[in-house]
Amino acid sequence: MKNISKSFLSVLCLAIALLTTTLTSAQSKSKEKDFVISIKKDAQNMTLRCIRGCAWTNLEFDLNSVKTVDQYGTVSADSKSQNQDPKLASFQFSIDFVNGKFVLKGLKGTAWNTLNFESEIINKDGVLPKS
């Protein structure tokens, strides 16, 4: 009977340790800051408006050039992020306009690799539904 009790207690302790580790990991992932950005075009330009998670408010680019954007604004494609402000999301993506659609490639801090759309609002998970 003692052997069964010791075995049960060992298994219970191991299960609690694993559960605690899993919960801690899930909590740290949920604390990641999100970003929300509106992307639109006019005749010759694309306009990005950060709604949440950025140090910038508005960015405007020529439609005929690929740009790389992070939480601080426009960066070079191979740049490393600056010191991270805990109030901001940590992300980086490239944006281009091809055949009448925006093409975004997630480089860091996005759940998506590539997005294609006309004019939308995005976040780290992808395109948000229109309200």
Image: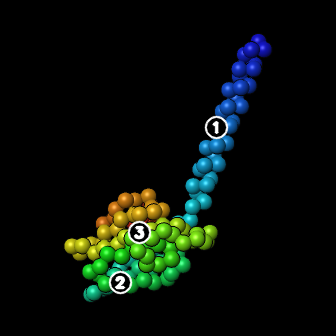
Q: Earlier in the sequence, mark 3 or mark 1?
A: 1
Task: Identify whether 121 is placed above or below 8.
Answer: below
Residue carrying label 1:
18
Direction left: furthest residue? 99
Q: Name the residue: 40% across, 63% down.
A: 106
Which residue type does callout 2 highlight?
Answer: Phe
Q: Quarter holding the C terminus?
A: bottom left
Residue carrying label 2:
61
Which residue type does callout 1 highlight?
Answer: Leu
Q: How many marks?
A: 3
Number of residues whose C-alpha sits closer than 10 Å to that of mark 2, classed few (under 14), some (14–19) or many (20 or more) = some
- Of 50 and 80, which appears nearest the observer? 80
Q: Name the residue: 43% across, 76% down.
A: 75
Q: Name the residue: 30% across, 66% down.
A: 116
Residue carrying label 3:
78
Q: Nearer the viewer, mark 3 or mark 2?
A: 3
State yes or no: discs 3 and 1 in contact (Cβ < 8 Å): no
Q: Name the residue: 47% across, 78% down.
A: 73
